[in-house]
Amino acid sequence: MKKKTFVTKEQLEAIAEQFPTPFHLYDEKGIRANAQAVKDAFSWNKGFKEYFAVKATPNPFLIQILHEYGCGCDCSSLAELVLSDACNVRGEDIMFSSNDTPAEEFVKAKELGAIINLDDFTHIAFLEESIGEIPKTISLRYNPGGVYEISNGIMDNPGDSKYGMTKAQLFKGYQILREKGAKRFGLHSFLVSNTVTNDYYPTLARTLFQLVVELKEQTGIEIGFINLSGGVGIAYKPEEQANDIAVIGEGVHQAFNEILVPAGLSDVAIYTEMGRFMMGPYGCLVTRALHEKHIYKEYIGVDACAANLMRPAMYGAYHHITVMGKENKPCDHMYDIVGALCENNDKFAIDRMLPKIDKGDLLVIHDTGAHGFAMGYNYNGRLWSSEILLQEDGTPKLIRRAQTVADYYSTFDCFDEFKGKLQ
Ligand SMILES: *Cc1c(COP(=O)(O)O)cnc(C)c1O
């Protein structure tokens, strides 16, 4: 399918006059329609809740939009808990799904009344030590080991992943938690990232539903909620078929009816912790062509760099690029689209066929709404860009200002000899 931008060239030129490039732009209309579609897809389940994975797009303005659709926050660090609290998302609207967790983060999670999801068997004792009790509601993360296969082949290798606990640890864990006074139990598992198939959640759901039935038979413990976590992907490439959340929700529903209902577990709530699917397609990185360079290859240098979007450099990830105003021109030029870092992997695209690019052209790098800005870093003294929301009425709203040199050096403020000099 041809990938389209959610803004026109004229709109973008007007926004760029007000806010200099580069910036990440978010599509409010798209975010809202998708959040509603997720809600509808799981409306068959009374307790359903999506806990948005804050790490994907940690912006309070965007979290608040999702909260209007009933979304909570999935947090995995102290800073994310603080952000959730600032967005008035508290109590059991927070899922604290962390790993290798420091004690003070469990303390903060308890203070906010978050649901704590333990990554490891040993964390039961560590949690009790850290917060002085076992919460009434508690969840455990499962890792089935081995390789994980669904209908179209092997998807990933949980046996190699650091997350979660074994089945034996899980069953023992719930029994210990029950002895220690826990009343409401959750099961969590995250096996594969960025799945572009409608089968992932339904397949995972079947695995977890069967496990929950077995747990009930063996121990009498009834699970109250099952958290399918993240991993629902998006179509980064034009040739990929986007996931259909309605089909996914129905697939989980069928598994629920076949496995949980006959086992007398029809009150189980389904939770999700999607990040990429909630935000990915509704953000883009907007950058301008600064230089063209002709050596052994053709290069276009833009004013964004890997510090603004790390996925291509880190994973070789594909991000579609549209040259604004040239959507219908033939893609008859091969370019590497590069940023300014002194690192040769600072390339948004390699050997990409695109229309002829002229200096000053605006380029839209698609699907940066999740794990985009959030993975930004400051290597080479490159600063974070601003974030802008394209509101439903078509007007832009600044939702994070760009970082300044003074921000970047602010951790030297406490040293008299550099005070006020680094800005
Ligand atoms: C990263 C993460 C998510 C979100 O994953 P997506 O692939 O963005 O949906 C959810 N839960 C946990 C625990 C995570 O670490």
Image (spheres, rainbow, N blue to C red):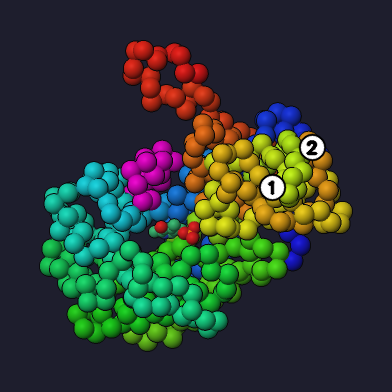
Residue at 28% over, 83% down: 214
Q: How many marks?
A: 2
Give the residue pinned by disc 1.
337
Q: Position of residue 269 (x, y in %)?
A: 39, 68
Q: Nearer the viewer, residue 129 or 113?
A: 129
Is any atom of residue 25 visible in this view?
no
Compare marks 1 and 2 and give the one earlier in the sequence.
Answer: 1
Residue at 49% over, 37% down: 379
Position of residue 83 in the picture relative to residue 120 (left or right): right
- Taking the image in four quarters, ligand 1 sits in the one at bottom left
Give the residue pinned by disc 2.
359
From the image, give the main secondary structure of the stretch colored magenta.
Answer: helix
> Mark 2 CB in 8 Å range of ligand 1?
no
Q: Position of residue 408 (x, y in %)?
A: 47, 28
Few, some or many residues within 10 Å of mark 1 (<14, 14–19, 20+): many
Q: Amino acid at mark 2?
A: Lys
Q: Position of residue 330 (x, y in %)?
A: 86, 57
Circle number at residue 397: none
Asked if the stretch drawn in magenta spans residue 86, the answer is yes
Q: Amino acid at mark 1?
A: Ile
Mark 2: secondary structure: loop
Q: Which residues are magenta?
A: 75-93
Asked if the stretch drawn in magenta spans residue 171, the answer is no
> Mark 1 CB in 8 Å range of ligand 1?
no
Q: What separation in Å lies between label 1 and label 2 (alpha carbons)?
A: 12 Å
Rendered position, 281 above or below 25: below
> Residue reaching furthest front?
296
Position of residue 65 in the picture relative to residue 144 (left or right): right
Is any atom of residue 194 visible in this view?
yes
Residue at 63% over, 58% down: 318
Quadrant in the picture for residue 179: bottom left
Quadrant in the picture for residue 352: bottom right
